[in-house]
Every structure is written in C-alpha cells, then in structure tokens.
Image (cartoon, grey):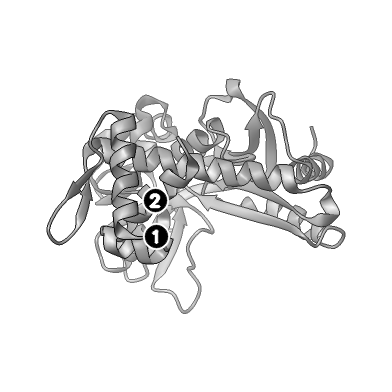
Amino acid sequence: MELRLLRYFLAVAKEQSITGATEILHVTQPTLSRQLSELETELGTKLLIRGKRRVTLTEKGLLFRQRAEEILSLTEKTEQEIKTPDLFAGGDIYIGCAESDNIRFLAQTAKDLQQDYQNLRYHLSSGNAADVQLRLEKGLLDFGVLMDPFDKRSYNCLPLPGVDTWGLLMRKDSLLTTHAHITREELKNLPLLVSEQDLAAGNDSPYNAWLHQSFTDLNIVATYNLIFNAALMVREGMGYALTLDKLVSTGPDSALCFKPLFPQLEAHIYFVWRKYQIFSPAAKLFLEHMRQKYGA
C-alpha cells in the first residue's frame, strides 16, 4: 500500500467530499475516485459512504483513518530523524505531556539547549496518561511525562523534582473560599468534575486511599480529559473540579480559586521513555541534559 493512497484517503475524510479533496491534492476527480476504489478493493472492505452531498466513513473507515494518521505521522518522524545529518543541522524532539506544573523542568532544559543548538524543534502534545502511553508504544513520541500511578515496567523513569498538590477548583463566590483547605467530609457532598483518567483507574485512583471509600461514590456530575474545558464549566457554576494546583489561573482577574485537599494529597511526576528505545541524535541530546540536571 502506497503512502500516497493514505494521503488521498485522509484528504477525502477531512473534506468529506471527493471534489473538495481533488482541489487540495491537485488530481482529477476520476483519478481520485479510481484510487479510492482500488484501495477498498485491496483492503477487501468498504471505507467510504458516497452520499449526494458528502462522503462519510464506515466503521472500518474510521479505524483506517486513525491508522493512516499514525502511519504518516511515524513516517514523517522517521524521515526527519534519518535526513538530519547532525545536531547542528537541526533535529526534532517529540514529547507527550500530562497536565502538570512540572513541565517547567523540561522547558528549562529546552531553553538551556537552545543557546547551543538553535535548530532543535520541539513537538509537544497534551493528553492524559492513556493517550501518552499509547503514542509512546507506537513510537510516535520520544518521551512522556506521566503521573503516578502508572505501570513503570515498560519504561525508564526519571522522577522530576517538583510535587503537584491535589485540590479543588471553585468559583470565588463559593462559601468554601473562606476555608484554608477542603476535607474529606466537605468533598463528599459537592457536585464534582473529575478527570476521566482518575475515574477509569478505579481502585488504583489516588483518591480512594485518601477518601477511605470508593472514588466512584462521590457526586460526580461530569468528567474531563484536560482541565481547560472543566475550568470553564466551573466558572459557569457547574460544580467543583478536582485537579492539580497551578494549572488554571486563579489570580486577581480570575473568577476562580484553588483550595488544597486536607490531609494533603500529592502527585509525583516522571519523565519517561520506553526501555530499549533507539533515539535520534536530538532526542538523545535532550535525554542526556535531563539526566544531568535531574539525576539518574
């Protein structure tokens, strides 16, 4: 299967139109239609539903789009690594990040390297632990930033020196803003927005031991993947978000504030990479400097 066919298919999926895709790809409509038909024949399944107004994807087509995007992304990453003759000609570093104030340690390393290697390029993708781990396993990332708990057996792990604190994000007009911290009993009756990752962790969630009961027994009104959208819902009065400190602005101009949990619940953050990972020169350089600055 040629990479060209993957690009043709993704263009049609994005535009939801063969005509629209031909304008982007600069090919004729008969040529594109023929290539797509040959692709479906090769795979032995229907990928596209050709409607009168738009083209939609079948269930197999949705899966194929995901795989095609991964293949092209990995191909591009590989080409960049192979074509880069040395660090002075530039290099690309791919990092998947959980939401944490500890990302500043990676930023400090990148800033230090920038003085001597100005052509290094960093590609940061944000996501929860499952997203980052999946992209690590597929070779789409060089490094990840993960938060306990996670299975460390597949990774080399470098603990980052900072510690994040769990707490409650709330509106400043909440009665709880007068409290220095939030206790277990106060938390149990509140409408909560929690991360999908913590909810999916079940008994492994750090909240279970802290609460002395199941995390799922709380009054959960919504889940979130990244805190930005959850913060908007909190601001509109939807409830209170369980999150880490320093991720959302709570300054004088913000309608929100953050209160830590009590007893204190901390999150430990790790800079990780796959065991037996083969690095590009740029990624290897970044890892060496991270180890020099933060140990191991």
Q: Sequence-wise, which precedes: disc 1 or disc 2?
A: 2
Left or right: 178 in relation to 41? right
Asked whether 216 or 39 is in front, the reply is 39
Give the residue at the far right of this rendering. 116
Q: Position of residue 133 (x, y in %)?
A: 51, 34
Is 123 displayed left or right of 35 in the figure? Answer: right
- Label count reads 2
The x and y percentages for residue 161 are 70, 44
Determine the residue positioned at 54% across, 38% down. Answer: 147
The local crowd at label 1, few if under 14, some if 14 to 19, many if 20 or more residues have their Cα within 10 Å, is: few
Q: Secondary structure at mark 2?
A: helix
Q: Residue furthest bottom?
A: 253
Quarter the C terminus occupies: top right
Q: Amino acid at mark 2?
A: Tyr
Q: Are marks 1 and 2 in contact (CB under 8 Å)?
A: yes
Q: Which residue is mark 1?
A: 27
Which disc number belongs to residue 8?
A: 2
